[in-house]
Image (spheres, rainbow, N blue to C red):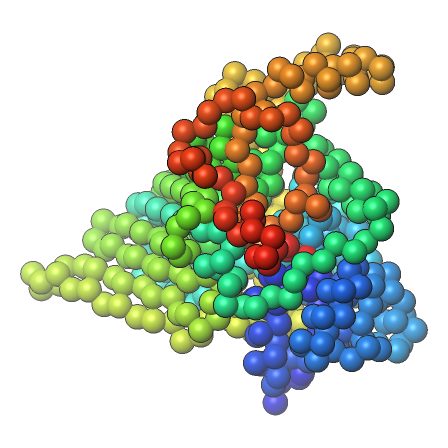
Amino acid sequence: MPKILNIAVVGAGTMAQAVHLPVLRRRWDRFSVAALVDHSPRRRREASEVWGIEEERRYETVADLVAAVRARTLSLDGVLLSTDGLHVDDLLAIVRRGIPVMVEPPLGYSEEEIAKVAEFERIAGRRLVMLAHPQQYDDSVARMSEHIATKDLRMVDHEVLMPASQPLFGQAHVTTSSYDLPTEQRTARRKALQAAVEAGTGDGATQRDRDLYVKGLLTGVAHQMAVTEAAYGPIEKLVAVRHWPKGVIPGSIELLGELGSGAQVRLVWHYLPFAPEYSETLQVLSARRRMRLDLPAPSHGDARSTVSLREKKSGVVQEVATTAPKGSAELMWEAFHAFVEKGEAPRAGAAEALRQVVLLREVLATIVEADGRSLEAEPEEADAATDPSEAEQDEAEQADAVPAAATVEVELPGAEPAPESLEQPAAPSTEEVVDAWSGGAEGAPAAAEDPAAPQDPRR
């Protein structure tokens, strides 16, 4: 009989409660929730009560969790790290104890940040990090290369329609977000996150560029890249990039890339706050076959993916459709069990995240260059930054002149809430954005404006 793994859940936010904890509870034959960590006293208490975590198994910080492991008052086989903000420091504190970790992406915001984890794994001589991309483990995705082999692949077209929070997480009944941290601690967390994103995007990036990087590329396109890589390998070459509507963040992003086999990949990610449901489809072409996959959101645990294959046999066009036997989140946790117990390599870890963040930085640079700018700071800007008084004056001038004031920003479902997210431009919008929310313009979902609606931080 398989061993029951003791799992600590770090961060009891939306992704933990909507995706992971339901699987851990259902698969009691493989997992036991041994501890819960959350820096918010209210959320730690409420989530623990909902999910049956006793008082003595609740911790405020990862440092407290590691101290309990070191003191041998707590035994762990694995950890789910699903906090908001930065991951690397907490992650390294855990893996230094030799404990495997499943991490909610993004692992980090810059090549240098993720390289710390990859270097630790290299020194340790084993993989200890697995990224939580559920659809990578979906049965339909796993069989893609069986239906159309890499050598026969002509084109992969992957499209995602991302709605607001309610269609994704409304049925999960996540406990209410709580921001009961001291002001100084919240400010320090926000500044640390801002610094990490600035390091990842470059000194010449505007706030709009940084928000597009975090809210569109790292949380949207990165998922699509992970799914494609699981089936046919990584994108080796960036061919073209497009972002629209102008001034809307994250809006829509289109990426055309090339695999090592020479096959083309087209990724399209739309944030549509008023879309009625989440939609994710892949169309895969070869010279003889056409394959279509429909992937449900991992938060819809009872939904199953489907794959249909059309081809001509004996002069007749035939279509065969199959449905996956299990949900992607459950299959991912089964893979984590094998990762911990048997050492089976994950489909995405630190090495894959490092390669991915390099490509996404290139995607952002391409979008910025199309706007006639660069992610690298101009020499005069770098010199001015050495003088604090001049830097403050420049920032004041830019607040009046930078077009970011016309940016429509949105809160992504499952993403960081406003109090813990990147600092937002203070200047009011002076430019009309076509197709934006509340006046025909696209932007923040209604749930984000409704004080009664649950906030869905990825924590």
Which quadrant would residue 18 be assigned to in this image?
bottom right
The quadrant of the picture occupied by the N terminus is: bottom right
Left/right of residue 380 with respect to residue 236 in the rendered view? right
| Residue 148 in the image: above or below residue 6 | above
Rendered residue at 80%/72% (across/down): 58
The quadrant of the picture occupied by the C terminus is: bottom right
Rendered residue at 65%/29% (across/down): 425
- Which sits in the foreground, 55 or 24? 55
Q: Residue furthest right?
A: 71
- Which sits in the foreground, 52 or 335? 52
Rendered residue at 60%/36% (across/down): 211
Residue 380, visible in the rendered structure = yes
Left/right of residue 312 with respect to residue 428 in the rendered view? left
Q: Residue furthest left?
A: 315
Residue 348, visible in the rendered structure = no
Whole-percent x, y for residue 121 in the image:
73, 55
| Residue 218 in the image: above or below residue 299 | above
Whole-percent x, y for residue 354 in the image:
63, 45
Whole-percent x, y for residue 64 in the image:
87, 65
Q: How many marks?
A: 0
- Which sits in the foreground, 14 or 68? 14
Whole-percent x, y for residue 180 in the image:
79, 56
Q: Residue furthest top?
A: 380
Rendered residue at 86%/71% (across/down): 69
